[in-house]
Amino acid sequence: MANSPSGESVLERADRILAAFTAEEPRLTGAGIAARAGLPPATAHRLVREMARRGWLDRVEGGRYVVGTRLWELANRSSRELGLAQAARPFMGDIHAVLRQHVQLGIVEGREVLLVERLSHPRAVPVRSAVAGRLPLHLSATGLVLLAHAPEEFRESYLEGPLPALTELSPTDPGVLAEELARIRVAGHALQTGYLETDTAGIAVPVRGRGEQVVAGLGVITPAGDPAARAGAIVQALHTAAHGIRRTLRETRRDTAG
Amino acid sequence: MANSPSGESVLERADRILAAFTAEEPRLTGAGIAARAGLPPATAHRLVREMARRGWLDRVEGGRYVVGTRLWELANRSSRELGLAQAARPFMGDIHAVLRQHVQLGIVEGREVLLVERLSHPRAVPVRSAVAGRLPLHLSATGLVLLAHAPEEFRESYLEGPLPALTELSPTDPGVLAEELARIRVAGHALQTGYLETDTAGIAVPVRGRGEQVVAGLGVITPAGDPAARAGAIVQALHTAAHGIRRTLRETRRDTAG
């Protein structure tokens, strides 16, 4: 693999350039890319130009760059993430129509939950995450349900930390968190209030794939003050949707169960 | 840029490897990747392993590879395509709820329309395209409306061909197609019957971005036998949705009008 003097491969540098673009900063100048990617300007510029030639980056007004349409196409057309999102969307739509809150679908990526689909209601409680956004697994209900059903070695390594906190209610004690994960496995759903934002709560259930393995978490975000009696109805709606998603995954050819 | 003996860069080879994966064949062996990408097996294997280390490819059961979750994340989290799709989705949902047919949103990519969003109804007429799939611009209503509003030089170069046909009804005469594009600009919508598949018809309108430029085409696919009287109502619904999408694009921070 062609390496730079620092031993980095071209792909590693391209990865760092792509990682410089975020939902908050989707348009960057060549100099901005170099700074964020931590690359020498000449190296960054050369690689940015080559990526732009391939359509991995697109040049827009003001000489800025955005992540390219060709890369979007390459990453999506065969992706398990898109297949999963499309299988889930009609069922998420049903929940959304009834509850009028955010409904989201997440998968495990490293120590975080990566949101692959979200349906939002204009008047739903505002939340910080977005599609293709990430959150630490132990801070959202969708992440907790994934963590609870992850392989034991992964769970143990996760509990060793770090366990970042976003509010005073975020769980940071590994022992307390381990007990909560055990309760989630028994109950079949996760419920958190204020772990992520003081004024929101989350409820989530596991989505199984073709086999018994959990391939995603399906969750609803509600205002923290929502009556507890409503939680039972939400859990029931989520389980019904998770069942429908699983049936669709079994019926479709596209591999989504990784 | 580090080049192989054949003069190809690492990125070009990585692009060919990613392009080997399709919606129909989302899981490939190392040998399958090499064959489809037209790369020597040793070269392909080395690069595939490096891509797998970065998460650009993920290894699944049977030693096969799929396009990686990290690449999906990098390509989506700041993408104009996702921003556009998310802005459009609620309005597409409204149309979908009323018409119960496929509703799709496409952008120009080369000589083709790239579908960035699709809402499908289980009982809608079956169609050949999928999200992140492509069709020649002149064969779908969504593509025709984009072609009609493309810059004049692009349109002229497009008309020089090739103009592939998929059915006996597909337009292949540049003069006839040029007249049709002029009619579309005057009428404000495109309507095709049987260009793509003999038993489906399409109706589409342009979606404008923050300025006056057309950033997407919004279309509905219906059975070819649908009464012509219905077309007027569909066009009206599409224009209303396109207006709503434009308003949302103007109100959101994320750049989608690139």
Image (cartoon, coloured by chain):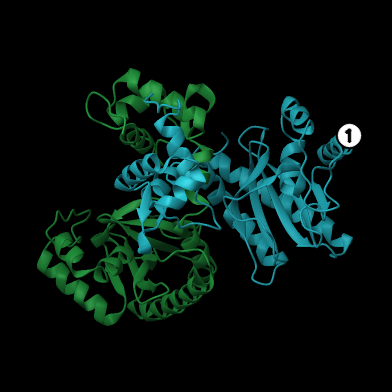
Chain colours: A cyan, B green
Label 1 chain ID: A
Nearest the viewer among B135 and B252 is: B252
> In which quarter of the view is residue A27 placed?
bottom left
How many marks can you see? 1
Q: What residue is shown at x 14% (from left), y 65% (from top)? A: B156
Q: Give amino acid for label 1.
A: Gly
Which residue is the site of mark 1? A175
Q: Position of residue A63 (x, y in %)?
A: 35, 59
Q: Quadrant of the N terminus of chain B?
A: top left
> Can you say whether A240 is above or below B180 in the image?
above
Residue drawn at x 60%, y 50% as measured from the top left: A133
Q: Is residue B58 visible in this depiction of the protein?
A: no
Determine whether A173 is above or below A94 in the image: above
Image spot of residue B54 (x, y percent): 50, 32
Q: Is residue B73 visible?
A: yes
Secondary structure of the residue carrying numbered label 1: helix
Relative vertical location of residue A19 with respect to residue B216 in this rendering, above or below: above
Query: Where is residue B47, by image quadrant?
Result: top left
Q: Residues within 10 Å of mark 1 (few under 14, many from 20)?
A: few
Left or right: residue A38 compared with residue B258: right
Residue sitting at the far top: B42
Q: Position of residue B233 (x, y in %)?
A: 41, 80
Task: Pick whichever, B17 or B217, lies toward us.
Answer: B17
